[in-house]
Amino acid sequence: FIEMKPDCVRIYPTLVVKETGLENLLNERKYSPFTLEESVQIVKKLLALFYVNNINVIREGLQATDDIQLGKAILDGPYHPAFRELVESEMIKDYLKSIENKVKSNILVKTNKKNISKIIGNKKSNSNYMKNELNVILKTKEEIIDTNTLEIVLDDNIEVETNMNHIYESLYKIYNL
């Protein structure tokens, strides 16, 4: 896809939909979908690849509707109504882990309120990971700044201003793409 140089792409992890051939294969145990976690790990790398190649990703995952939900039209597969946020949250966690060696006790991320949930993570997953695995307290502070900007304060004194572009470029290297 990158070689085709599209203006934009959409990323849809494969879902098993009712009354399709894939449902038959699932029922015959000839198909096993990726888990949500596996899909997030794959899509975060795709996002980094598309970003560094200047390809806009305009959608990740199916948009939720009355029918498009697990247990209705979707029988199995990596469906989540906020799939893109899960992916971007995981990417932010990966980035924060990459600067962890510069931190002794806490990270404060000042950002637009639209980014707060991505930084904290779904069900506080990023905050819990930083605390339990890295012994670092992750805090956020809402600021009136561009949604692309993150002001990161390490241990209450070292300020690092970054943006989502820098994070994507850093992750491209971290993911060895």
Image (cartoon, rainbow, N blue to C red):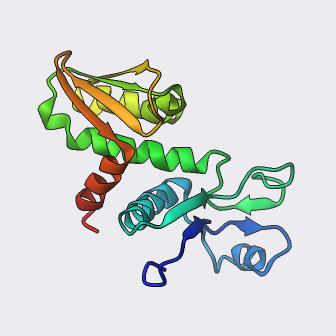
Which residue sits at x=86%, y=54%? 67
Residue 135 coordinates in the image, percent (x, y): 23, 25
- Quarter that holds the C terminus: bottom left
* Outermost residue, top side: 156
* Apparent side of residue 128 relative to residue 86 in the rendered image (left or right): left
Residue 66 coordinates in the image, percent (x, y): 86, 49
Residue 111 coordinates in the image, percent (x, y): 42, 27
Residue 109 coordinates in the image, percent (x, y): 34, 26
Which residue sits at x=62%, y=45%? 82
Which residue sits at x=76%, y=73%? 23
Between residue 76 and residue 106, name the one nearer to us: 106
93 shown above or below 80: above
Q: Residue 175: which quarter of the image?
A: bottom left
Which residue sits at x=27%, y=33%? 161
Q: Residue 50: which quarter of the image?
A: bottom left
The number of discs equals 0
3 shown above or below 89: below
* Apparent side of residue 121 relative to residue 66 in the rendered image (left or right): left
Between residue 167 and residue 87, name the one nearer to us: 167
Q: Residue 78: which quarter of the image?
A: bottom right
* Apparent side of residue 106 relative to residue 1 in the rendered image (left or right): left
Between residue 77 and residue 158, name the one nearer to us: 158
